Image (cartoon, rainbow, N blue to C red):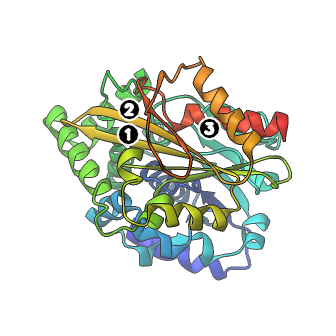
Amino acid sequence: MISFLKRSKILLNSTSKLCVILGNESCDLDSVVSAIALAFFYSKIYPDQSGFIPILNIPRTSFPIKTEVTYFLGKYNITDELLVFKDDTSNEFIKKSSVILVDHHVSPYRDSVIEVFDHRPVDSSAELPIASKKIIEQVGSCATLIADLILRSRGLNDEFKLTLQLLYGAIVMDTVNFSPEACRKTELDSEIAAKIENFVGISDPGHHRENVFAELVKAREDIKSLTPYQLLHKDMKLISNSDGSIRVAIPGYPILVQEFIKKPDAKHAIEMFAKEYNSSSIVLIGMKITNGSDVIRDIGLININNDGLFEEILDKIKIHDKPNLQLQEIENTNFLCGRFFKQENIRATRKQILPIVKKILDEKY
């Protein structure tokens, strides 16, 4: 794996036709390990084809914010020096390459896309090439889809053990350690995790899963060195209308919104963040894990410069029923004239909230 990552960086200077494996802009653990694992796998089973380069879809300077990612990759001696980030290359380089999207399927590089691996609901605005291969299945983790591909390969051998361990960490994390209450796991997630445990020789799967999950949660929540402004970038999605003139930022972080807004300088951080992304509204997504796997969620909605959009999002998230978020308004929260809610339906994630906002932007703006 280390040798592969070193070689993939050298390919940035190649004039040959290359294949870029691109993760999503939140650059969470699932996105990162899926991109790295798929690139490594394809480099082994298609050695005579064009070079494969995994690209992390954030600037290099933002990587330290991804505390659980840096921790988990570091366990396997994968440092940032071995990785390729979005600002290490150019839009032109990516567009002239073949592109494989992992953990997302809406992309400005859609005309170059040859394959997609994603686990979120299909977005009709993606407009992917008809000939592109699409594996889009609503499982708990995109890493499950990549691991399934590797485990079914006739070329499966011991050199893929590290690759599968990386994917395993993302599966455990994304399913909240297969918690029934979180309801993130599917039958395929459980099946693939068990196959990985068997392949790499984990003798006590239950105990091992608990340890992996606890380590990752601890690393993700290690935000003491991050400013409020950095926290907003830790796991951020940006959604826009068709011409990009109206934008909504949807940052998520491993603390509750109510905790975030009480931080010193939180107000200034929101204002700077909104200006940076030219965002008309901001939807704050908070989540906290207690007692090992108990999940608490809350939401904040802040208007920046578009009253109509703010009210539209507010109305839609309150009445949405597929799924119903079961929002309970938190009264007397005086922060940037926002509206704040406890989310009783802990099973609903940003993946369900994001399409609500996208539909409003597509239909009204």
Q: In the image, which is nearer the foreground, mark 2 or mark 1?
A: 1
Q: Mark 1 points at which residue?
A: 171
At label 2, the amino acid type is Ile
- The reply to whether callout 2 and callout 1 are in contact (CB within 8 Å) is yes
At label 1, the amino acid type is Ile
Residue 153 appears at what percent x and percent y? 48, 40
**Any mark on residue 192, and which?**
2
Q: Determine the CA span between mark 3 and mark 2.
A: 27 Å
Look at the numbered disc 3 and give the secondary structure of its residue. Answer: helix
Residue 314 appears at what percent x and percent y? 63, 33
**Any mark on residue 354, and which?**
3
Residue 98 appears at what percent x and percent y? 73, 59
Look at the numbered disc 2 and give the secondary structure of its residue. Answer: helix
Within 10 Å of disc 2 (Cα), the crowding (few <14, some 14-19, many 20+) is many
Q: Determine the CA span between mark 3 and mark 1.
A: 21 Å
The residue lying at 32 percent from left, 54 percent from top is 220
Q: Which of 210 and 18 is in front in this view?
A: 210
Name the quadrant containing residue 63. Answer: bottom left
Ranked by sequence position, the earlier of labels 3 and 1 is 1
Q: Please indicate, yes or no, whether residue 136 appears anywhere in the rendered image.
A: yes
